Image (cartoon, helix red, strand yellow):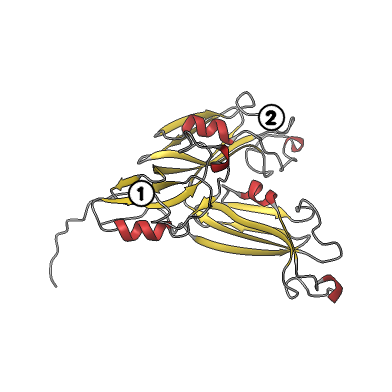
Amino acid sequence: LLIFTHMSLLSKYTVVTCDGFVQRLSCDTGVISVQSATCGRTSSQICSVGRPPSETSNTQCSIDVPAVFKRCNGLRECELNTQGLAPKDPCFGTYKYYTTNYICIPAETSVTCHGGYSYLKCENGEIQINTANYGRTDKTTCSEGRPSSELQNTNCYSPNALAPVSKSCNGLESCEVFATHTVFTDPCVGIYKYLAISYFCSSIVCEHETSALNCGVANYGRTDSSTCSTGRPASQLAKTDCYALNSQTVVTSGCEGKNNCSILASNSVFSDPCVGTFKYLYISYSCVSKCKCDCTEQ
């Protein structure tokens, strides 16, 4: 009997928000992984109420918004004020809207206030860091007893948080990370910070290798730049939001109900979710024994 420990890896959502309003992303289970985020206009109907035709007729207007990835990836909930969120105005005179596509991926989370130690542990499998930030993205986390002046900057991101956390924890069953500016760059002096981490408990198989499993769910792609990176150029490791949409289906069909199974980590088995990126297969799984029951017919 196979029991999965997480909900579907591929819950997909699209959120459209008119310019100047607050965009809200959330996951009931797992954490946010933004697949695309744009600002512009590709339809004359969306966000058009009360707007003159001159502001809605240009439907060839779109620009990527990297800030949505940066602020929301790895969180269970994320709120964004869209005013000024885009890096530039892609079409002057046109009233724009923000479109974000994201999925909810199964991951564990850890939040540690400044000065504390973050303890990560996997009962089964190895730790694989998904996201890490030392800074502040809201006014409530780690706010008790702190003056308002230390909580105001909610756009505070350490530029190097992912690297030291991944180096300390990836491939281990447990690890600890000190949440302090002696480990991470201080991204906002005077603001009280915290370390927020999302991670997977996974079995890792590099591309072209075969995974021998007991049972599991999976993703074929890349979520960090360090795993399966030996001998690979930086260009093949840079994309870290790479998810094959058929990962769970492939693993389920090959492994569910079996005591063991093998899956080749290859584009020929999974779709290629990011051409040019060297990928790996991670698996989060749980195995339980079949129940032995005493049954009485009525």
The image's mark for residue 125 is none
Gap in Å between the C-alphas at discs 2 and 1?
37 Å
Indicate whether 261 appears above or below 116: below
The percent coordinates of residue 166 (x first, y second) are 51, 34
Q: Amino acid at mark 2?
A: Asp
Q: Is residue 52 visible?
A: no
| Residue labelled with disc 2 | 186
Answer whether residue 12 is visible to the viewer in this image. Answer: yes
Q: Position of residue 170 (x, y in %)?
A: 46, 35
Residue plotted at (42% across, 56% down) = 270
In the structure shown, which secondary structural element does the residue marked by tag 1 occupy? Answer: loop
Tell me the kind of residue under disc 1.
Tyr
Quick check: marks 2 and 1 in contact, CB under 8 Å?
A: no
Q: What SS does tag 2 mark?
A: loop
Q: In the rendering, which numbered label is found on residue 285?
A: 1
In screen coordinates, is 34 left or right of 188? left
Quarter placement of the N terminus: bottom left
Q: Quadrant of residue 126?
A: top left
Residue 152, quarter of the rendered image: top right
Residue drawn at x 62%, y 33% is 160
Question: Quick one: quadrant of the C terminus?
Answer: bottom left
Image coords of residue 28 (percent x, y): 52, 57
Label 1 Cα crowd, 10 Å radius (few <14 / some 14-19 / many 20+) = many
| Residue at 75% over, 52% down | 85
For this orientation, the residue located farthest to the top is 182
Mark 2 and mark 1 lie on one chain; the one further toward the N terminus is: 2
